[in-house]
Amino acid sequence: MGRTLSQLWRDQSGQGMAEYGLLTALIALVALVAVRTLGENLKQKFEQMAEVLGNVNW
């Protein structure tokens, strides 16, 4: 029993999957922040364009 527990304690076969999960979560977080920032910048640009076009006398 002690030898089996010792082998399980040293077994690192599932470690790679946890690392891939953390890496995937980090990439998703970075992508989310980038999309939110880009969206806010685009929103401001479109609002500026709408304001300029609204002030034009056709």
Image: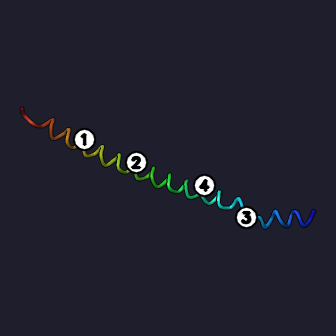
| Mark 3 surroundings within 10 Å by alpha-carbon count, few (fewer than 14), some (14 through 19), many (20 or more) | few
Q: Residue at x 80, y 65 (%)?
A: 9
Across and down, in percent, residue 24 comes to 55, 54
Residue 35 percent coordinates (x, y): 40, 49
Q: From the viewer's perspective, is 49 left or right of 10?
A: left
Residue beneath label 2, please? 36
Sequence-first tag of 2 and 1? 2
Colour scheme shown: rainbow
Q: CA distance from mark 2 to mark 1?
A: 17 Å
| Kind of residue at disc 1 | Glu
Of residue 17 and residue 35, the one placed in the foreground of this image is 17
Q: Amino acid at mark 2?
A: Arg
Numbered disc in front, either 2 or 3: 3
Residue 45 spot, x, y in % from top left: 25, 46
Determine crowd level at label 1: few under 14, some 14-19, many 20+ residues with C-alpha closer than 10 A. Answer: few
Mark 1 lies on residue:
47
